[in-house]
Every structure is written in structure tokens, then in C-alpha cells.
Image: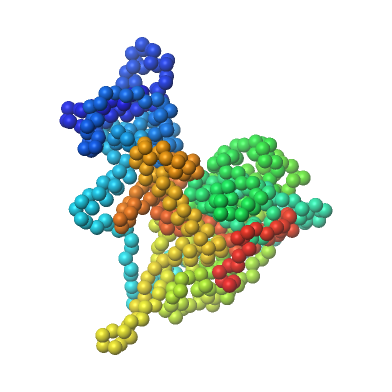
Amino acid sequence: MSEAKGEDSNGHGVIVIYDISSCGSDAEDSSDDAEIAANRSKRQRMMPLSLSPALSSSSSSSSSSLSSSDAEDEIAFCCKVCMCPHDEQSSHLISSGDDAVFHRCCCHKIDSYKPDWKSPFDVVCLQMEENLLNNQPEHSIEKGEEYYGKEDSKKLIRSDATKESSYENELSMYAYDQVIYTCAKFLKYNRKYQAVTREEHRKSKRAVVLDVFAGIGAGVVALKRLGIDIKKVIHIEIDPVCTHVFKQNHDCKYNNDLVNDDISYVYDAYSRFEDVESDIEGLLEKYGSIDIVMGGPPCQDYTPVNAFRKGVEGEQGKYLPNFGKFIQVLQEQQGHENPLFFLVENVEIRKMEDMNPIQEVFGIPGFPTDAKDLSPCRRKRHFWINFPVERVNPDDSISTKSCLEEGWGLPADILEFDSRDEEGNWRKANTFMASKARIDDERMLRLQKIEEESSTGKRKVRYKKGTFTVSEREKMLGFPNGYVMHAMELLHKELRKVLLVRSKHEMKTNEYKKFSAKLKMFSGKRFKFKLRGDDVDILIDQPQQSKKQISHFNKEDYSKHLLGNTFSIPVVEHLLKPLSEVFASREYDRYDYKYEWQN
């Protein structure tokens, strides 16, 4: 492979787009086949580059050779691992200057001659430099403050209540909390649970946990709060941001500030559900029998928010019944002498044509819950579990006030207007959602009362509008303070050390090597850069199934997105409590905390 510099007919500097697949290939180099030679010529296109003054002096330098390993070592972090669809992947590389790092053409959708190409970060840097040269302030993406009068705020309350009602399942669901207790399969599961609790070795075994669709690890948080002794956690999650948050809060090998909890964490065995689904035999051979399986498969095809939902027939909807089939096969293969307990979560499913095939797979109906019975926020969900379920005794005394910043409250509370719902209970925060369009919609409204004195001496009241912060959502869902936000702040700080590197020289520093190794799971994700004041903000994409739905989030919005996808800790803790009678017990550092509303 070679790098040819010179000038094209328009006076631009030129550089070869390297084809790293052909580097070191003696067979192709020695071949006289005209077709191979023609294909090689097509692959090695010339790209014009406007050279900066610092580089122009070397634009006419002679060609120099570059080995395949050198090229691989000098690929930018964002392109180090190619995540493009297989049929779109390319071995072509491009850079924007002599010392600039290489990027993969496929990752940046470069398939033809493009003059003056710059990487996304280069473009933002040029914008910043241009603003400085022109003495213009950078554009900020911060939202301005909004204020409302009392009547406008009341209208918002009514509008929000209508939206939330439309998002929830208003059907009876035929009192499934009663149906499950008369289900023959569920009664059989209960008898098996009772037999296990009568065994002599009960409460001496450490649990091996398979956490599929693991998210940020809410299930593991609940197990630790219950004091269940965990031996191993096999964490399977497609989103590396979720895995980072989990590691940062649980794994002392990843976060040196944590106390060693004597749990073996496994991340690299399987990256997707399909991987473990097709390798049950290998899973059992490598890790032994599994004691607890937890997971929350994608809900897009069941949620009433999605007008295009397809239920069990949808691309995302199929994961729920397939997860149920996987659990049944896993139990069969590991043998019934090794009992397997499972907890599976999804949104409250509205249509019986979806519920029936899911019930057929699991053998039991979904158990309905609403987080408002145990916490300050609403969150209707269905759970499929094969051990005793204790009925929830709603705690109507829990309010959101303890979880909100001082001076802020739910609109109805701040306005002293309709503070109780139709059932006479204190209002709770509306359901947190994950989509970019709904993480901060009007259902997330909070208000602060601002009292001022006018020039005439009259008292003036305004209401400052805001939405629930990341910290407030963490508290209402029962997570430790900073569980998500602190991890996201650290992630962005560390990503800056690898993503904002523009030169090959910087890539050779120990700091770059350290963080590029630690953050390897993020290589290949799509990043965007935006000016925020006089700084550069990094936006991360979420895992997508469709090219038409690509969304990028900054650290605050990504945190809200993660919390919109997770479990309510008080609900899962309540459901998992019977397993405390099966496994050994212990205490965990940082997980014996009280919920915010209990302080």
C-alpha cells in the first residue's frame, strides 16, 4: 500500500484512499490477471484535499510505503471497529492531511470523489475557529427558561393527564392479578418453589444469574438490595452505553473505586440474545447450571405509544415469546434437578391476540404491576415469573416531593389544584419513556412558583416550567443517587480522550492507548459533535434496527433514555423477594440504601 501526494489539475493536494484488504497480498501483487488489476485500480481512488499552509510544503513529496498493520493502528477510534452492514463494509481508508488519522470510507458513507473531505470533528473545529476569527460567539444549544401564568399551567395539567391516559392500557385485563393464582402451571411452579425452600441446602447456594436484555442492570440492583448472594452475572446487552453504566456501578475491575463484591461478571460471552439463544448447550457447558434468568425484551411492538406496533409478529415483538421459548429449553437442557427461576418484563400488553400466544409460551399470564403503588412514579408493566407473587399493598402516602429539587413540584401540587387523582390518591409522576420525542414531553412537566413584587407594589406570581432531571428520575425509580448520570459524565469525559484525537502523533500517547482499550466496546458507534458554548459536545447514537430511526443523544438525554427503558427497582425488588428464601444471603456495599421517600 502506498500514499501518493501531489496535485491534481485544479491544484488540490491528493491522497490515495488505501485499500487495506490488498495490503501484503503477494498473490494479487504477482498476478498478471487483467481483471484483478482493473479492480485494484477502481479501489484505489484519488481524493483531492485542500492542504493547510503547514502541509502544503510537503504536498509534492515522493510516495512512501505504509504497511497494513500501520494503517490499522492509525484508524480513528470511531472507525476502529466497523459496524456497517456487511454488504456495505469497505476496506478503503481516507484521511484529511499528512498527520491526520485515517477513517473508514464506509463508516462515513464515502463512495465517490469528494473534494475537501473533513471528519465530523474537523468540521466542528473549523466552525469554532471561524467563530473565533470573526469574533462571534458560538451558538449554544441550551434551552431558554419558560414561564406560565396559573391558567395556562392548569391547561397544561389537563393536557398532560389526557396524554398519559392515552399512553396507558385502559382496559381491565380481566383482573390478571387474580387469574395468575388459579393458573395450573403457576400453581405447579409454586409447588416446585416450596419444595426447593424445604431442601436442607437451601439458603447455602450462591446464585448464577443470566441477565438478558440487561439494560443498566436494574435486576441486579434489586438482587443486591435483597441481599441475595450472587456468584456470577452473565450480562447480555446490545447497547455498550448500558454496559458501561452497569460496569461503572458494579465491577471493581472496571471502576477501581468500587469495593470487590466477589461476583464474577461476564460481558463478552454473548453480545445479543440471538447469540445465546443458539448456544444453550455451550452456555451450560461453560458456566454450569443457571439459577436466575432476568430480562426485559424490546417493547416497541406492544406499547400503545407506537401507532405502527405489530405485536408478536413484529421485528421487536418476537423477542418476548422467543425469550419464553429460550427459558423453557434452557430448563429442559440443564435438568429439572437444577431449578431455574425467571423474571421477564414488558409493557402492559393491551391486545389479547398478543397476550394469548405469549401466555402459551410461558404457560402463565402476565402479572400486572404499576410502580405508583410502591414509588412516586407511574409505570404499568407485565411480569412473567415462576415463583410466588405477593400482592402489592399500595402506599398512597408516597409523593414525588421527596425526589424533586427544592422548590419544584408536580404542577397540580404547586398550583394547589386537583392534587389528587380520580381515585383520591396523591398524584404521581407520569411514566418515563425512552424515545427522543417523549423523554421530555409535557407529561414530564414540573413547576416552580416564582413570587415577585411589581413596581406598583402588587404581588406577581409566575410559574417556571421545567422537566424532571436525570437525578430526579433516578430517585423516583429507586436507583442510588448518580447511578446513571455519574457514569454518563465519566463516559463522555473519557470518550473525549479518544474521539477528539485528530493526529497520528496523539494516537501514540499512553493516555490514548489506555482509554481506547477501555472503551473498545464504543468503537464503531456513530457519534456527532455539536458546539456547546465554547466547547464541543459529543452525541452518541442508540442501537437501531432501522436506518430511518437513527437518534443521537447528549449525556443528559441518553441518561433519560436509559431510565425510560429500565425497571422500577421497588417493583422488581418486591417481586424477587421470595428468592431470598432460596439462596444464601450477604450484604453489599452501596446497596443497603433507603429510597429517597423513606428518608
Position of residue 5 relative to residue 476, above or below, is: above
Position of residue 355 relative to residue 597, above or below, is: above
What x and y, as percent, mark residue 160?
42, 68
**Please, which residue is most extreme toward the top here?**
32
* Observer-nearest of 305 and 107: 107
Q: Where's the N terminus, which quadrant? A: top left
* Observer-nearest of 2 and 480: 2
In the figure, is residue 130 to the left or right of 430?
A: left
What x and y, as percent, mark residue 470?
46, 62
* Observer-nearest of 110 and 264: 264
Position of residue 52 relative to residue 496, above or below, is: above
Residue 452 in view? yes
* Residue plotted at (29% across, 48% down): 124
What x and y, as percent, mark residue 227?
68, 59
In the figure, is residue 180 to the left or right of 77?
A: right
In the figure, is residue 208 to the left or right of 68?
A: right
**Please, which residue is most extreme toward the right here?**
200
* Residue plotted at (21% across, 28% down): 7
Q: Where's the C terminus, which quadrant? A: bottom right
Quadrant in the rendering for residue 388:
bottom right
* Residue plotted at (53% across, 69% down): 376
What x and y, as percent, mark residue 482?
51, 60
